[in-house]
Amino acid sequence: MKHSDEIQHNLAKLTLVPLPGSSKPAASGFSAAAAQSVASEVNVEATLILRRRAEPRAEDFSQPHSKAELTEKYGAAETDLDLVKATLSGLGLSVMSSDAASRRVRISGSADLMGRIFGTDLQSHREPDATGSEVTFRHRSGELSVPEQLSGVVTAVLGLDDRPQSRTLFRFVPAAARTTSYTPVQLGSIYGFPEEFDGSGQQIAIIELGGGFVQADLDSYFHDLGLPTPSVRAIGVDGGGNQPDGNPNGPDGEVMLDIEVAGALAPGAEILVYFAPNTDAGFVDAVSAAAHAKPAPAAISISWGQSEDGWTAQARTAFDQALADAALLGVTVTAAAGDDGSTDRAPDGKSHVDFPASSPHALACGGTRLEANPANGEVSAETVWNNGPGAGATGGGVSRAFDLPSWQQIAGVPLAEEKAGRGVPDVAAVADPETGYLVRVDGKNTVIGGTSAVSPLWAALVARLVQAKGQGLGLLQPQLYPESGVGKVPPGFRDIVSGSNGAFQASPGWDACTGLGVPRGTELLTRLVSKNQAD
């Protein structure tokens, strides 16, 4: 830490410039007149994202990079890291950690100092958290600034406002509404997962922003399935941790669903559960920690999200870049497409897509309603999941934040307000809680649905495919989409052609309800191996 006289001198000369994309609206129900500033001495932590050395091109995702290669090509320059650390420590902030590969600098300081350096007033605000309980959060609105010498170097300042950034994407229905349910093992059979591979030697990372798991529940669940309990390890990020609260309808339900689906469908894989605070900083930091781990996981599963309009542009870009880093490192990221149909719960009633599923660097996972015989795997019907207004439906649509990727150019993605955007989802599987997943949460067996379940299902399939191929798949979409145009069903998929999610209707080939369709796992493996041999 610099001498206090030097710090005061530097603060007196401080000149701030606006940080593009940082503008954040006030929370619903927030009253500036009644608000109180966060006590000046309260310690605040934040994550800074720095600019890349260079932006990756589409062809750069064709082969996995080592961490050293990623750092050298696309990481933060050491001169930028040194400048940021020297500048902020010279202003009295503490630099907790820095990483050139993920371009992150973690800092801390008093609320008063943070507000002064980043041009904002941090205020207290009470708002429901992910469990619905009223909790006090730090709140900011308007635009942030950065010290003039860091303009263009720092591209995002995350975590000053710690309101809940995302919500869980799973659904319950009353027992009377369920027509059937499936264990993940039964779904592996129905969707043709390759039996000769079980994910052995692979890791699946799961991102959680609350809740926790109980080992006794996992042991009981996998025992009942006739499977050994997989290795499940909790990893804390930014102060997060495995903290089950005993409420199966809250984040515990999400955590247990994710672990049990992934563990049952890739029983040979190790499950790494990254727990982080439900903030923009926590979410980005958890994904970055998982992507840059050694060894790199085969897949990262994300079952939390929010309409892409509910993110600041800086946070959305920083998150997308973290997902791009994962893909460059050979890691496939699966993300739930949302459980509220084509509106994604947006109050204007218009079409919106969920983020991070709308990132072109995430494999967006939509949902179906499945009628099948669990005993023999015979499917009698599979349609788009849509139980009506307020009762749940698969997310899907067209992004207004991300351009149409090259691999979707001829898929038939509709325009969004006369603009070509990234189409969501890419793939699907059962998500309707009326035909849902049999799991165990907080000591009780129950049935859960939602696209939350589809993300770990696809992550488990990816782990099996990576085991078979012997290398990470990274950005999977360029290998999945057909090259022959609209209405075509590529090998490895069973098309879903019936139903809608509100604004969008299922149709032959890709659609904004279930993407390319549901997996035919063994057929998909054959296709990927054949493509690898051809390349």
Image (tube, rainbow, N blue to C red):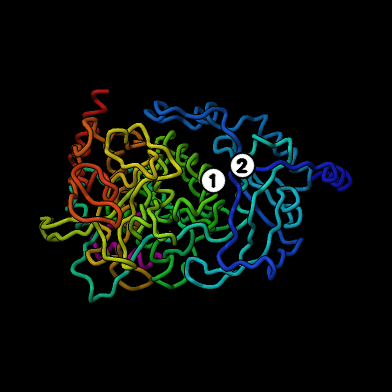
Q: Is residue 109 left or right of residue 534?
A: right
Quadrant containing the N terminus in the rendered view: top right
Q: Would residue 292 be seen by someone viewing this image from the given angle? A: no
Question: Which residue is rendered at x = 40% and y = 35% of the image?
Answer: 330
Amino acid type at image mark 1: Ala
Q: Is residue 4 left or right of residue 42?
A: right
Instruction: Depth check: give the residue in front, 194 or 354.
Output: 354
Question: Which residue is rendered at x = 61% and y = 42% of the image?
Answer: 20
Q: Which residues, given as a range, are shown in magenta?
A: 214-230
Percent position of residue 294, x then y: 47, 40
Q: Residue most toward the top?
A: 535
Q: Residue most toward the right?
A: 5
Q: Which residue is mark 1?
A: 313
Contact, mark 1 vs mark 2 (Cβ under 8 Å): yes
Question: Which residue is rendered at x = 12% and y = 61% of the image?
Answer: 373
Q: Which residue is mark 2?
A: 20
